[in-house]
């Protein structure tokens, strides 16, 4: 493509990152008092904590009684850790816990103004959830947001009759600590929904946003996952040990955590799922999941959450 031709092309999605939200949309964001969270895993519990600490009424929907119990335990432990570290008082902890309730019936989310979906990174499951949420949630202005790391927001939106109010709000693990949220709109997401969601994240939750296009991996994972997969390939080839790979990147590049330890923290199943989604969309060899990573996932060696990944974890880490 010539320079002249390239310069004449108009981007499909304009950069809205610097556009201020109109006053009525800021008010709409502040008026979101009832938040639903679908999923009680690490991210679901983290999202519930973030919203509860911001003073919102949070209802968490779990897949069953066992998942509900684990989610409640995760939330209690995280809030207790905040007290131990001096980040919150016991009164703060108790107030946040009082704002969170749990259910195993998605129909209980009918009165929510914002629903954050944090189910496993499995597209059929998420599509089914968005169809159900669209039928259940009564408020026609409610926003349905996915915490997906790499899946198409467009496909999730098309599963509903309100595609203008479906978007991605991609938080990072651990959600109570990391300040970034990617706001991802599809070509069908309304500007109003995008701005209300961004205002909720910043003005209510106190986090920072980047606006990302609806492409697999968005911004962060499109850059991060190929790096993690390269580290897995290096380890798989026997070129260096896991410890030396991580030491090289922490001491040589001032990364706070090495790539293999980070992959364990994220979850090796999640890393593999994002890599697969990236490869399916772009067909880049650097996105292909290495055989070793596939075998580890098949064997249930998922990193920190299973106790074994590239490192072995006890109660307090490797």
Image (cartoon, rainbow, N blue to C red):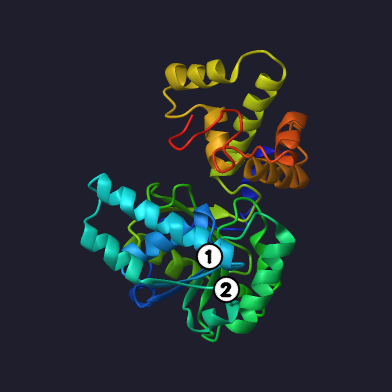
Q: Position of residue 162 (x, y in %)?
A: 62, 78
Could one spot residue 301 in this view of the protein?
yes
Tell me whether circle 2 and circle 1 mark residues in contact (CB < 8 Å).
yes
Could one spot residue 39 in this view of the protein?
no
Residue at image position (44%, 57%) is: 73
Nearer to me, 241 or 141: 241
Q: Please give the residue where the numbered disc 2 appears in the rendered image.
A: 104
Q: Position of residue 288 (x, y in %)?
A: 75, 35
Whole-number angstrom distance, CA of label 2 to CA of label 1: 7 Å
Residue at image position (51%, 58%) is: 70
Q: Please give the residue where the numbered disc 1 appears in the rendered image.
A: 68
Q: Position of residue 281 (x, y in %)?
A: 75, 47
**Where on the picture, by quarter, is residue 55?**
bottom left
Q: In the rendered picture of this protein, how many numbered marks are placed on residues?
A: 2
Q: Is residue 4 left or right of residue 95?
A: right
**Where on the picture, by quarter, is residue 213?**
bottom right
- Is 108 situated above or below 53? below
Q: Is residue 24 left or right of residue 311?
A: left
SS at mark 1? Answer: helix
Q: Residue furthest top?
A: 239
Mark 2 or mark 1: name the one nearer the start of the chain. Answer: 1
Residue at image position (62%, 45%) is: 7
Q: Is residue 148 left or right of residue 256?
A: right
**Where on the picture, by quarter, is residue 61?**
bottom right
- Is 214 situated above or below 25? above
Residue at image position (71%, 36%) is: 287
Q: Position of residue 174 (x, y in %)?
A: 44, 47
SS at mark 2? Answer: loop
């Amino acid at each position: 493509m010539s320079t002249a031709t390239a310069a004449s092309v108009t981007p499909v999605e304009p950069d809205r990152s610097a556009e201020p939200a109109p006053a009525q949309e800021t008010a709409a964001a502040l008026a979101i008092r009832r938040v639903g969270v679908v999923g009680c895993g690490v991210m679901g519990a983290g999202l519930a904590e973030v919203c509860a600490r911001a003073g919102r009424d949070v209802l968490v929907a779990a897949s069953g009684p066992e998942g509900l119990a684990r989610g409640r335990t995760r939330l209690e432990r995280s809030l207790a850790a905040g007290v131990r570290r001096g980040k919150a008082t016991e009164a703060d902890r108790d107030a946040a816990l009082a704002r969170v309730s749990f259910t195993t019936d998605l129909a209980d989310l009918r009165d929510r103004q914002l629903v954050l979906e944090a189910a496993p990174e499995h597209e059929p499951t998420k599509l089914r959830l968005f169809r159900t949420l669209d039928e259940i949630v009564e408020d026609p202005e409610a926003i349905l947001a996915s915490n997906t790391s790499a899946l198409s927001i467009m496909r999730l939106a098309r599963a509903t009759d309100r595609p203008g109010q479906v978007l991605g709000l991609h938080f990072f693990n651990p959600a109570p600590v990391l300040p970034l949220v990617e706001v991802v709109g599809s070509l069908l997401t309304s500007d109003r929904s995008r701005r209300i969601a961004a205002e909720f994240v910043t003005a209510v939750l106190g986090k920072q946003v980047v606006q990302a296009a609806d492409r697999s991996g968005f911004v962060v994972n499109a850059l991060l996952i190929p790096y993690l997969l390269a580290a897995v390939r290096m380890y798989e080839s026997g070129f260096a040990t896991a410890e030396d790979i991580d030491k090289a990147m922490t001491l040589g590049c001032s990364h706070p955590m090495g790539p293999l330890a980070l992959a364990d923290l994220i979850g090796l199943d999640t890393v593999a799922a994002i890599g697969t989604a990236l490869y399916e969309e772009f067909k880049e060899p650097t996105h292909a999941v290495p055989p070793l990573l596939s075998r580890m996932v098949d064997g249930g060696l998922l990193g920190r959450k299973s106790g074994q990944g590239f490192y072995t974890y006890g109660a307090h880490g490797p």
